[in-house]
Amino acid sequence: MKKAAVINDLSGIGRCSLTVALTLLNTLQVQACPLPTAILSNQTGFDSFSFLDFTPYMGQFFQHWKDIGYRFDSIYSGFLGSKEQIKIVLEFIQLFKEDKTLVLIDPVMGDNGELYSIYDEAYPTHMKELVAKADIITPNITEFSLLTGYDLAWGINQEKIKSYAKELAKLGPKQIVITGVCDEAHPERLMNIGLDFNKAIYFMKEVAYNGKSYSGTGDIFASVLCGYLTHGYSLEEAVDIASTFISQAITYTSDFNLSTKEGIMYEPFLKELSIK
């Protein structure tokens, strides 16, 4: 069975990070091996939460994996709490990446046009060091802007997106998926934009949008993407499946009086995910 090292936080409530990654990757016949960055009672969108920083333990945690000879088909990194954790993940990649190991980096650091308040303005520069080691990255449109300087006021300007993404790809990642891009002509939907510089492919996939911002949708998207890419699916195939999965779950969740802090109700659609 394929194996993925998943580096992310563990939030007990909120349908995000490791909670969804383990479920989705295991559903997709990938053994998900979690390396926690932090352990939280619930995701940080709630008014209060408990937080255990796992930074002091991460190195010895994965050194044991190396000592017992564990190898991974993919390495998938999500939320990191500090530039120190970025350095730790860089060490992890250096230790475990082999010629055919897929490295997927979800550069979690902002949303809704702003850098998350837990980070200083230098954080995107540090994140670029990690992005440079990736095969594929999955920034939302805010994170794409923070990494490249793309002006969010441009909306879906396809030529500018291609140009800025091309410069970003020069750092290392030859596949880039930009999520949550607003389509001003169709406010009932968002777009996920994929660029595969290995094949000179550019494409867009729409995602249902009900005007709400739910916890964990980026984690769900990246987890599904990682699962299918680990099995050798093309980027466009994987993005199409992940976008459809997210759309189904958002549409379903809209019928319930559920706080956005709880995330989307994706569980009924797990049966839709399969490897052919």
Image: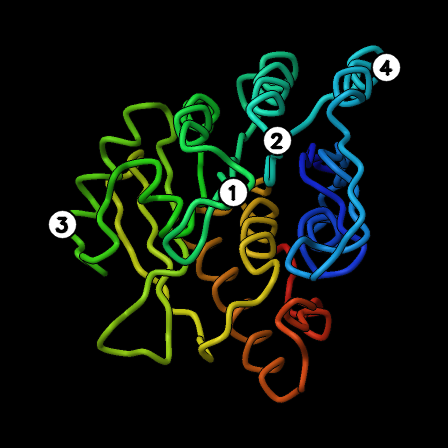
Query: What amino acid is at disc 2?
Result: Ile
Assess whether mark 2 and mark 1 are in contact (beta carbons under 8 angstroms). no
Residue occupying image coordinates x 57% and y 24%:
86
Which quadrant of the structure image shows residue 276?
bottom right
| Spatial CA span between label 3 and label 4 | 48 Å
Residue occupying image coordinates x 33% and y 55%:
193
- The label number, if any, that marks residue 68 in the structure image: 4
Regarding mark 1 in the picture, which secondary structure is present there? loop
- The label number, if any, that marks residue 108 in the structure image: 1
Query: What amino acid is at disc 1?
Result: Val
Residue 38 pos. (x, y %)? 74, 37
Residue 182 pos. (x, y %)? 32, 66
For this view, does 205 lie left or right of residue 79? left
In the rendered image of this protein, does residue 79 appear above or below residue 73?
below
First in sequence: mark 3 vs mark 2: 2
* Mark 1 residue crowding within 10 angstroms, few (<14) / some (14–19) / many (20+): many
Mark 3 or 1: the one toward you: 1
Q: Name the residue under label 2.
A: 75
Regarding mark 4 in the picture, which secondary structure is present there? loop
| Spatial CA span between label 4 and label 1 | 30 Å
Mark 3 or 4: the one toward you: 3
| Spatial CA span between label 4 and label 2 | 18 Å
Mark 4 or 1: the one toward you: 1
First in sequence: mark 3 vs mark 4: 4
